[in-house]
Amino acid sequence: MAWAQRAEVSVGSPFGLQGGLRFPLVPLLLEGRAYGGVGLQALGGGVDLLLKVPLTDLYLGLGGFYGTGKAFSLPQDEAGQGGVRGVFGTWLNLPLPFVGVYLELHPIYYLVPSQDFGLGIALGVSLGF
């Protein structure tokens, strides 16, 4: 927690309700994120590497996750327990000090229990330290 830059809570992919921490890896360019989550069908966690797009509110990333049940994505029939995901995110411009709101799109490749594709979305709130 001492190295974390932001604490986050999000609703959506991959588990329903997630809480996590963002860590600066390369200032103003690369961040890491670790999170855990719980939902109606799954409990799990994951990590992401997030690359900030300079001079914009956009960021791109790649991560992995694993849970005890089906992840929250579409199509739900194809959802698995674990896999890798892309992260396409943007910060929403709200005039709140130390508070950020973000929206993310997650293309997912499930590896466990079978290989398939899915698409998730998440809306989150981030509190800066």
Image (spheres, rainbow, N blue to C red):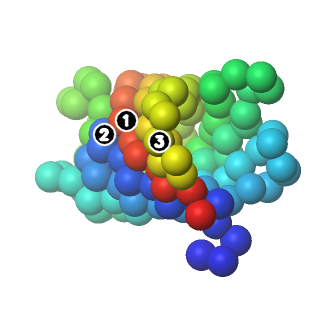
Q: Which residue is mark 2?
A: 12
Q: Is residue 105 left or right of residue 55?
A: left
Q: Is residue 79 left or right of residue 45?
A: left
Of badges 2 and 3, the one in the foreground is 3
Q: Is residue 14 left or right of residue 87?
A: left
Label ID, residue 96: 3
Residue 100, position in %: x, y?
Answer: 49, 42
Q: Nearer the viewer, residue 80 or 114?
A: 80
Q: Are marks 1 and 2 in contact (CB under 8 Å)?
A: yes
Residue type highlighted by circle 1:
Ala
Measure the alpha-carbon separation of dots 1 and 2.
4 Å
User: Which label's residue is closer to the chain start, 1 or 2?
Assistant: 2
Q: Is residue 101 visible?
A: yes
Measure the alpha-carbon separation of dots 2 and 3.
23 Å
* Residue ID at (81%, 40%): 29
Residue type highlighted by circle 3:
Leu
* Residue ID at (41%, 46%): 125
Q: Nearer the viewer, residue 112 or 120?
A: 120
Q: Name the element at disc 1.
A: strand
Measure the alpha-carbon separation of dots 1 and 3.
20 Å
* Residue ID at (64%, 36%): 61
Residue 70, position in %: x, y?
Answer: 26, 47
Label ID, residue 122: 1
Where is residue 25, by image quadrant? Answer: bottom right
> Residue lying furthest left in this view?
40
In the depicted structure, whether residue 61 falls above or below residue 32: above
Check disc 2: other Cα within 10 Å, few if <14, some if 14-19, many if 20+.
Answer: many
